[in-house]
Image (cartoon, rainbow, N blue to C red):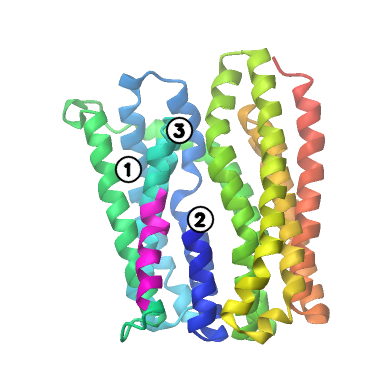
Amino acid sequence: MLAKFLLIVYIGKYLSIDDLGEYGLFVTTITIAIYFLGMDFYTYNTREILAKGKDDRLPLIRDQFIFHLVVYVVVLPLMLSVFAMGIINIEYIIYFYLILVFEHLSQELYRLYTTLQKPIFANTLLFLRTGLWVYVIIVFWHFHIPNTTNLKTIWYGWSIGSFISILIGISYIFKEYNFYKLKKNINWSWIKQGVKVSIPLFIGTLAYKIIEFCDRYMIDYYMTKADVGIYTFFGGIANSINIIVFTTVVMIYYPILISLYQHSKTLEYENELRSFTFKTILVSFIVAIAIIFLVFPILDFMDKNNLKEHIHILYLLVIANILLNITLVPHYILYVMKKDLIIRNSSMIGAILNILLNLVLIQYYGISGAAIATIFSFTAIGILKYTSSRKYRNDSF
């Protein structure tokens, strides 16, 4: 988490604001494309794995990755459109595809080990994928190593870090499970059922990502790469609230909540849910306060006046990320009860609202309008999910 934060800071200091905008669009496109590769299939398999004993989990793990390979054949060629539309510079095409595939596989392994309730190992993979290589680059840039202060160095490091995490993640699976004794054929009917279950959640997740990232594309369309860079910088800092809450709270609690609900352990479920709610809100505000206090010495270190002039963007995005984290509580209440259509519909309403607000507000208020649109969108989603979760909790168990 610190590495991702420092990377944004060092890009802002040693590269141009335009480069920061280019970086922001590259990362945004990778993030969205990964969801198309994954199709949120893990949400289906998470519940399937937790309902099985260890000996019955191996076919589920194998068949999930078979599904992803099929999706690759369809989706990867379509990704050429981002270069045809000029969203990403064509000179980065090889890096884009390497990072996209490696990042997706590493992310699925991270989710798998989270489901298997091995959070320390999962976060080790996450650190290799998003952390360790960043510190190497920061050292290179800080000591002015020749020919390293550019975006391509980031793409190199990202590719290597993700690939190493995949190798370690796969080796651990082979250590825990004996694939050579796996005699069951690929269960295509199970995969088809998984697709049917996952699609509503995928649409809901995609709607969330539209709210989180479409503003960057609209800023790029209506304004400049430098404006995207400013928004990306403050967005990256504010997003650390969400990353920290997910890593330290959500990934610990949601497998537990699913398991308790599936086994009808009402009292334990309610206790864990209260703890989950309290910690989600508490950590969100603690991190938000820390960010507000730390940002000024960081801006002094970067010495970029155009960033200081837009500090209000950070405040708006901090509010947006706190609201996003609060919506996770009713989200996971609905998720454990398999109310996937409600999750999808709430997120879609928020996404449509976000697009409409961005179209209007960015033209009148610039990048401030994009941040305001995000606040209103997450507020709408939170109200919808909270209302639905209260209704269905009264009928549960």
Secondary structure under the numbered disc 3 in the rendered image: helix
User: Which quadrant: the C terminus?
Assistant: top right
Point out the tag, 1 or 2, that comes first from the N-terminus. 2
Q: CA distance from mark 3 to mark 1?
A: 19 Å
Residue occupied by mark 3: 115
- Residue shown at 45% from the left, 33% from the top: 115
Q: Is residue 316 magenta?
A: no
Crowd tier of the residue under label 3, counting other residues whose Cα lies within 10 Å: few below 14, some 14–19, many 20 or above: many
Task: Read off the residue under disc 1.
Answer: 66
Q: Is residue 4 left or right of residue 61?
A: right
Rendered residue at 63%/53% (across/down): 241
The tag on residue 189 is: none
Q: Is residue 215 visible?
A: no
Residue for point 47% across, 78% down: 88
Residue 65 is drawn in which quadrant?
A: top left
Local crowd size for mark 1, using a 10 Å CA cut-off: few (<14), some (14–19), many (≥20): some
Work out how far the residue at label 2 is from the one at label 3, CA to CA, in angstroms.
21 Å
Q: CA distance from mark 1 to mark 2?
A: 31 Å
Three-letter amino acid code at disc 3? Thr
Secondary-structure class at tag 2: loop
Mark nearer the N terminus (2 vs 3): 2
**Looking at the image, is mark 1 or mark 2 nearer the viewer?**
2
Q: At 55% across and 26% down in the image, what residue appears? A: 256
Q: Secondary structure at mark 1?
A: helix
Image coords of residue 249 (percent x, y): 59, 38
Q: Which residues are magenta?
A: 126-140
In the picture, the disc for residue 1 is 2
Label 3 or label 1, whichever comes before in sequence order: 1
Circle 2: residue type: Met
Task: Locate residue 377, reporting x and y percent.
Answer: 77, 56
- In the foreground, 159 or 264: 159
